[in-house]
């Protein structure tokens, strides 16, 4: 089938699936993913393996957009002002999540590489889902801002850890090189990505500061996004890290960063809808019996890691009160509950993992997609509960 026709079918079908999901009070993200399953090889076959290969640049573009959006949320000044207060909380919930997921998957499957990779993927939150709930419920006070700061930190840590772990596993565990070669390759991945991100970020700053006409600015920002994905893909380095650094540069060094954020928002919706729907096409129904119990273990371990980690961090804050004085104790305990959703970042990284590592095709993606569907059904309610318990939701009357 013509690839343009496939894109049209995907986008139109996703739109109606999202409307139907919303009508039955399910997250629209769940509707997109489930429609992808219907369109994919496991069901209707409208999007087959050839179409998925042809549409791979769309996935890369969408992931780059996600990286740029995450980077544009990381404001160093506000973060550094509270870092001593965020440090324990960030370390507690992230490290406990990684540890619990790794141990649970390893004890259940005995597969060390998969356990390590799923532990890293479990770190990723769902920025769009969390931000959507925060906006929908007209929240107030510091807790929503603290949640978003933690979302950005988790995303940054997840993307960086994924780059390191996938490279080390490929070279060291799967025998594609030596340990020294793996370390050299990690440095060869991260250093150029940071350098390229800084250069493209500087270009982005020039664009939004010097170009006053909005349509022209939109064209150039889109070009920078394409370059921040295309150049790393050509060089074989992490484009997610490049786009993240680019976003961080722009939002922290330009007084006009809102122009940048606004331009991204004008193009992100259809791209992300296509991305999530195409992700659903990768869910292979024939491997579900294999991943069923493993998926349950992953979801439970991840939820437990987020919530238990926040509680442990709160205990650490009580022992070191000078390190956490700017964050309300109730907020610390509720933070794990608010960080439970998973969506685009984890899905994208699972796709990259299957492309970069010699693992069974469809296994990681199916596990993560199953987690996304479950978390999108449960986690928004948990976010609302955390916000309400923190007194951050404005009630009528």
Image: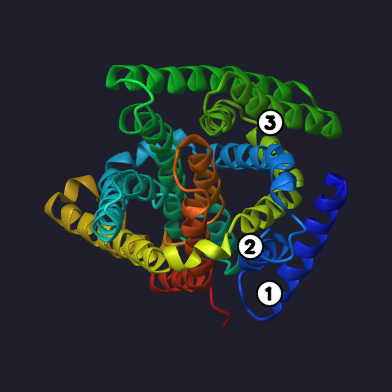
How far apart are labels 1 and 3 at the CA level? 31 Å
Q: Earlier in the sequence, mark 2 or mark 1?
A: 1
Instruction: Name the foreground residue: 196 vs 117.
Output: 117
Q: Mark 1 sits on what residue? A: 22
Residue 334 seen by the camera: no
Q: Residue at x 54, y 78 (%)?
A: 395
Indicate whether 222 appears above or below 96. Answer: above
Residue 27 seen by the camera: yes
Indicate left or right for 283 with 47 as reference.
left
Query: Where residue 390 sits: x, y (%)?
Result: 39, 69
Indicate left or right for 221 with 195 as reference.
right
Query: Where residue 79 sits: x, y (%)?
Result: 40, 39
Q: Residue at x 54, y 34 (%)?
A: 240
How far apart are labels 2 and 1 at the CA level? 13 Å
Secondary structure of the residue carrying numbered label 2:
helix
Q: Which mark is residue 208?
A: none
Q: Which mark is residue 225?
A: 3
Q: Earlier in the sequence, mark 2 or mark 3?
A: 2
Secondary structure of the residue carrying numbered label 1:
helix
Instruction: Name the foreground residue: 174 vs 191.
Output: 174
């Amino acid at each position: 089938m013509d690839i343009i026709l496939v894109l049209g079918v995907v986008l139109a079908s996703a739109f109606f699936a999202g409307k139907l999901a919303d009508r039955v009070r399910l997250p629209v993200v769940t509707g997109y993913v489930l429609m992808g399953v219907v369109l994919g090889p496991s069901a209707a076959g409208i999007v087959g393996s050839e179409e998925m290969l042809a549409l791979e640049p769309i996935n890369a573009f969408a992931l780059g957009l996600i990286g740029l959006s995450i980077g544009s949320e990381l404001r160093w000044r506000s973060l550094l002002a509270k870092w001593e207060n965020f440090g324990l909380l960030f370390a507690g919930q992230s490290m406990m999540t990684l540890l619990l997921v790794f141990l649970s998957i390893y004890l259940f499957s005995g597969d060390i590489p998969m356990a390590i990779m799923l532990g890293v993927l479990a770190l990723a939150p769902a920025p769009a889902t969390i931000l959507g709930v925060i906006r929908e419920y007209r929240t107030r006070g510091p807790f929503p801002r603290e949640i978003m700061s933690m979302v950005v930190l988790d995303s940054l840590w997840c993307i960086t850890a994924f780059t390191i772990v996938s490279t080390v596993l490929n070279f060291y565990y799967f025998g594609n090189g030596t340990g020294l070669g793996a370390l050299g390759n990690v440095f060869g991945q991260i250093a150029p990505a940071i350098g390229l991100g800084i250069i493209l970020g500087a270009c982005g700053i020039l664009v939004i500061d010097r170009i006053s006409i909005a349509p022209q600015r939109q064209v150039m920002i889109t070009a920078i996004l394409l370059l921040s994905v295309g150049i790393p893909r050509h060089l074989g380095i992490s484009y997610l890290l490049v786009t993240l650094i680019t976003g961080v540069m722009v939002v922290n060094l330009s007084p006009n960063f809102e122009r940048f954020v606004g331009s991204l928002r004008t193009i992100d919706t259809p791209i992300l809808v296509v991305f999530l729907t195409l992700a659903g096409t990768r869910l292979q129904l024939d491997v579900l019996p294999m991943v069923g119990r493993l998926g349950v273990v992953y979801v439970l371990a991840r939820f437990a890691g987020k919530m238990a980690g926040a509680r442990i961090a709160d205990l650490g804050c009580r022992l070191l009160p000078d390190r956490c004085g700017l964050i309300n104790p109730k907020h610390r305990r509720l933070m794990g509950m608010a960080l439970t959703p998973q969506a685009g970042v984890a899905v994208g990284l699972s796709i990259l993992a299957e492309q970069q590592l010699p693992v069974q095709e469809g296994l990681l993606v199916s596990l993560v997609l199953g987690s996304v569907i479950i978390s999108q059904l449960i986690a928004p309610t948990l976010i609302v509960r955390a916000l309400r318990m923190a007194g951050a939701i404005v009630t009528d009357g």
